[in-house]
Image (tube, grey):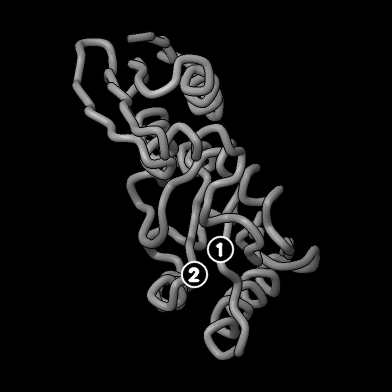
Amino acid sequence: MKTIDCRGQACPTPVIATKKALEESGSSIRVLVDDGAPRENVGRFVRNRGYQVIETAEADGWSLQVTGSVAAEETAQSNVPASASGDKVLLVTSDRLGDGPEELGYLLIKNFIFTLLETPQQPDRILFLNSGVLLATEGAETVEALKRLEERGVELLACGVCLDYFKKKDQLAVGQVTNMFSTAEHLLTASSVIKL
């Protein structure tokens, strides 16, 4: 079984290395990663592609044993996650809307998210980057509205590097942590992307 060492590497390098290793070696590899975002991102990446993962804590990180079937290998060879093709994606890169006064910007983004609950069409996925991740963390006035959107099937994904930067990783109140590799895939395979 091939082993790749991704310890000490920042997002999205561990996911990209895992993808390449699976393409080269096929159905089973062992990935060494740091705890936190690298472990979560690699685990989510391979599970979303149909692989099984056994995670083992080690003295200097985690070992992820990745195994899969032919179907998983075929999915891994495709650069498009099955759930992403043709989706409408809303890209939120700030915790305020527009370039005017900050207070007005905060009010506008909050009102926009609440308004999404009333519109007949909703995005399939909302990606939160940069300070946009703050909208999905504990204490944000937008959390309840985002929870209702998630209950309606809108996938909410917050950048793990961004959450780490703002020291809010443990305060994510809605949605899932994602990585830049998955973010790029979702943006490049969407039928439409709306950036706020």
Residue depicted at 54% across the width and 20% down the height: 20
Circle number at residue 154: 2
Return the x and y of residue 113 as percentages of the image width and height.
57, 76
Q: Quadrant of the C terminus?
A: bottom right
Label 1 crowd bin: few (<14), some (14–19), many (20+), radius 10 Å? many
Horizontal side of 63 relative to 12 (left or right) equals left
In the displayed orientation, state which residue is furthest to the front: 70
Upstream in sequence: badge 2 or badge 1 = 1
Return the x and y of residue 128 as percentages of the image width and height.
57, 55
Kindly indicate the quadrant of the structure image that contains residue 26. top left
Look at the picture and state if 16 lies above or below 155: above
Return the x and y of residue 71 as percentages of the image width and height.
42, 39
Q: Nearer the viewer, residue 90 or 142?
A: 90
Q: Nearer the viewer, residue 145 or 192?
A: 192
Residue depicted at 50% across the width and 28% down the height: 15
3D distance between C-alphas at marks 2 and 1: 5 Å
Label 2 crowd bin: few (<14), some (14–19), many (20+), radius 10 Å? some
Q: Nearer the viewer, residue 21 or 153?
A: 21
Circle number at residue 12: none
Circle number at residue 125: 1
Q: Secondary structure at mark 1?
A: strand
Look at the picture and state if 11 lies above or below 100: above
Residue depicted at 68% across the width and 57% down the height: 190
Q: Secondary structure at mark 2?
A: loop
- Kind of residue sitting beneath label 2: Val
Marks 2,1: beta carbons within 8 A:
yes
